[in-house]
Image (cartoon, rainbow, N blue to C red):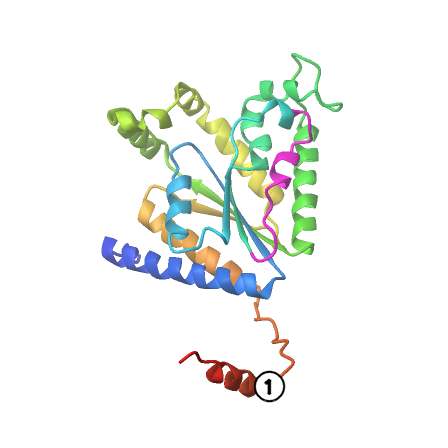
């Protein structure tokens, strides 16, 4: 079994990958046929924020759009569950990053079905009754159709589940409690959700099995080792953009390049 690369090697590799991502995003913009949507899911303290910062540390903010999704607002609850993310899909030439996404509606909502009732859905279960399996099947179908439509329209999709272990999450939560400046990152509900660990595991497995497709694959990335995690994610991002076979646009000059160069070289103010 190959040993883990050293910290210095991982840091250097990540720096090179971050530079490569910046270069590829510029090519993505010049090509102007594709957008890239990256979806990050994972339990609390799995490293989503830090990974996103690290892999785009060399990228221009003008080319990367990051959006985090928390508890739905009242306005968002007045729409279908895909509506709030649709507003932030990346345009061609850009990379869009969703820190959590519409998948919360088949993950958190599945573990906590009480979150479904405020949505007042016509096909939702009556209050107090369990949610039948076909309800989630319909949501998976909606997600698959949504992602297929995006892919056909020029949005490449890559989805990451950052898979932190039970013990490592506990250590990261304790570290947050030990640092007053990080108390804002901890909520008492985090302990509540740890008690539902197995339920979340089943929800993640069901979502991945139902929605991983060649045009919108899932990658489950071990998240206990943050340095290794970031390199693995960056490698998949580079591979996803490389697979688009980007090409620069053809020049639309009315004159030969030599003539344009001669005009500029003669255009002096001595």
Left or right for 172, reference 147: left
Along the line of sight, which residue is nearer the eye, 112 or 79?
79
Q: Is residue 134 above or below residue 95?
A: above
Is residue 262 visible from the viewing direction of this image?
A: yes
Q: Secondary structure at mark 1?
A: loop
Q: Is residue 156 left or right of residue 66?
A: right
- Which residue sits at x=44%, y=59%? 22
Residue on which the image places disc 1: 256
Q: Is residue 144 above or below residue 112?
A: below
* Residue 30 in which image quadrant: bottom right
The chief SS type of the magenta part is loop
* Rendered view: 63 above or below 206: below
State how many labels appear: 1
Across and down, in percent, residue 141 comes to 69, 39
Q: Which residues are magenta?
A: 77-93
117, 204: nearer the viewer: 117
| Coordinates of residue 156 in the picture (x, y in percent) | 59, 55
- In the displayed orientation, state which residue is furthest to the top: 128
**Which residue is depicted at the point 61% across and 62% down?**
32
């Amino acid at each position: 079994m190959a040993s883990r690369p050293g910290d210095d090697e991982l840091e250097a590799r990540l720096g090179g990958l971050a530079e490569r991502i910046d270069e590829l995003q510029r090519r993505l913009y010049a090509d102007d046929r594709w957008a890239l949507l990256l979806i990050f899911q994972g339990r609390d303290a799995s490293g989503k924020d830090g990974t996103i910062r690290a892999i785009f540390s060399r990228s221009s903010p003008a080319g990367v759009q990051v959006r985090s999704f928390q508890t739905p607002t009242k306005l968002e609850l007045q729409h279908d569950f895909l509506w709030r993310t649709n507003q932030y899909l990346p345009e061609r030439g850009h990379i869009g990053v969703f820190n959590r996404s519409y998948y919360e509606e088949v993950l958190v909502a599945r573990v906590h079905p009480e979150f479904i009732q405020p949505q007042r859905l016509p096909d939702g279960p009556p209050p107090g009754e369990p949610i039948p399996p076909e309800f989630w099947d319909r949501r998976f179908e909606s997600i698959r159709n949504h992602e297929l439509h995006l892919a056909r329209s020029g949005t490449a999709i890559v989805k990451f589940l950052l898979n932190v272990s039970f013990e490592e999450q506990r250590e990261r939560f304790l570290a947050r409690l030990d640092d007053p400046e990080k108390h804002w990152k901890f909520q008492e509900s985090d302990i509540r959700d740890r008690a539902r660990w197995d339920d979340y595991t089943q929800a993640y497995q069901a979502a991945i099995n139902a929605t991983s497709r060649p045009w919108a694959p899932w990658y489950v990335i071990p998240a206990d080792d943050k340095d290794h995690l970031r390199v693995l994610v960056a490698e998949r991002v580079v591979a996803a953009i490389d697979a688009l076979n980007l090409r620069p646009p053809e020049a639309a000059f009315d004159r030969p390049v030599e003539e344009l160069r001669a005009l500029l070289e003669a255009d002096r103010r001595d």
